[in-house]
Image (spheres, rainbow, N blue to C red):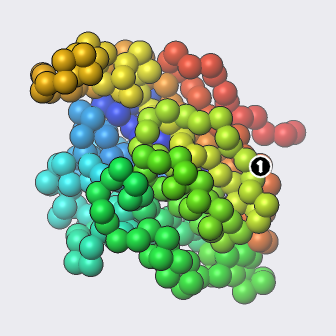
């Protein structure tokens, strides 16, 4: 299976870059599954239903969220209508939406998408480790011939701390196809396949304008650090966006990764576009 995961989409620049890139990524990489983190798509704060529809119509199979999940209130009723938009699993019981979804793919294959939020320097939510273990216990990763109920597992760990994300990756190594971090908006250079067969990257980076402060306009963001007083509301930078993410190839018989590479398309960062072997 070929999987593409794209990091936090930030504002108009990020949305437009992702919507342009999705059909090409689907075609060029012969992608079976595309997951997009959309929690900053709406002016940097939240996701509007029409934006979610745009991503899904352009080729995304699922959309994950994070700490800005509820910034656009109209998304709350939308979550009951569109199961492919996934909020963090470790929000308290009774929270609208769901933290995991099984996506039906071509050839009768199925993929489990899980979204969790870290707790270090974040909101004190329920334990992401314990709840992920409970969710994974309901499925068997691997090929149908071997009794597998799902052929891929993708987990988006939305968190601040690299240590927490790394501990999460090692904790579930072998039980997922891809564990990838989001939230810090900076792509890390540690893409790897862990010893148990899980592809891992601490942060996928953002899809947005990198001539910015993590996607926001430079001047307003820098002023907050200089003066340590509230300033004008932060707004996304609107220069050319870079699409950042990760590409994974997996073995359908095991659900484990056999290849992982970063994706960086357009904008200011060095370019990285995986190619398929002939």
Q: Where is residue 8 in the image (x, y as percent from the top left)?
A: 42, 41
Which residue: 69% across, 81% down? 148
Q: Position of residue 104 (x, y in %)?
A: 53, 69
Direction from residue 240 to residue 217 in the image, left or right: left
53 or 181, which is in the foreground?
A: 181
Name the quarter where the N terminus is drawn.
bottom right
Which residue: 40% across, 54% down? 120
**Residue 227 appears in which quarter of the rendering?**
top left
Name the quarter where the C terminus is drawn.
top right
Q: Residue furthest right?
A: 278
Residue with the mark numbered 1: 259
206 or 63, which is in the foreground?
A: 206
Q: Is residue 109 visible?
A: no
CA neighbours of label 1 inside 10 A, class few (<14), some (14 to 19), many (20+): some
195 or 59, which is in the foreground?
A: 195
23 or 131, which is in the foreground?
A: 131
Which residue: 67% across, 76% down? 141
Q: Where is residue 230 in the image (x, y as percent from the top left)?
A: 12, 27
Whether 89 is drawn above or below 167: the answer is: below
Question: Which element is circle 1 on?
Answer: strand
């Amino acid at each position: 299976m070929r999987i593409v995961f794209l990091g936090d989409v930030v504002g108009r620049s990020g949305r437009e870059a992702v919507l342009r890139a999705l059909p090409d990524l689907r075609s060029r990489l012969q992608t079976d599954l595309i997951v997009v983190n959309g929690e900053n798509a709406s002016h940097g704060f939240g996701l509007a239903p029409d934006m979610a529809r745009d991503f899904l119509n352009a080729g995304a199979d699922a959309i994950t969220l994070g700490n800005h999940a509820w910034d656009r209130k109209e998304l709350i009723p939308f979550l009951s209508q569109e199961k492919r938009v996934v909020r963090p699993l470790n929000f308290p019981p009774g929270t609208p939406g769901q933290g995991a979804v099984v996506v039906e793919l071509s050839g009768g294959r199925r993929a489990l998408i899980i979204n969790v939020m870290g707790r270090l320097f974040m909101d004190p939510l329920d334990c992401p480790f314990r709840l992920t273990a409970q969710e994974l216990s309901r499925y068997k990763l691997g090929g149908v011939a071997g009794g597998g109920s799902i052929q891929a597992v993708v987990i988006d760990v939305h968190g601040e701390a690299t240590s927490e994300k790394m501990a999460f990756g090692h904790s579930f190594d072998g039980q997922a196809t891809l564990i990838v971090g989001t939230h810090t908006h900076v792509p890390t250079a540690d893409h790897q396949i862990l010893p148990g067969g899980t592809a891992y990257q601490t942060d996928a980076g953002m899809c947005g304008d990198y001539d910015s402060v993590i996607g926001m306009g430079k001047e307003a963001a820098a002023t907050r650090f200089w003066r340590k007083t509230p300033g004008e509301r932060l707004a996304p930078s609107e220069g050319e966006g870079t699409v950042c993410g990760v590409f994974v190839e997996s073995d359908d018989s095991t659900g484990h990764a056999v290849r992982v590479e970063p994706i960086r398309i357009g904008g200011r960062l060095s370019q990285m576009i995986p190619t398929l072997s002939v």
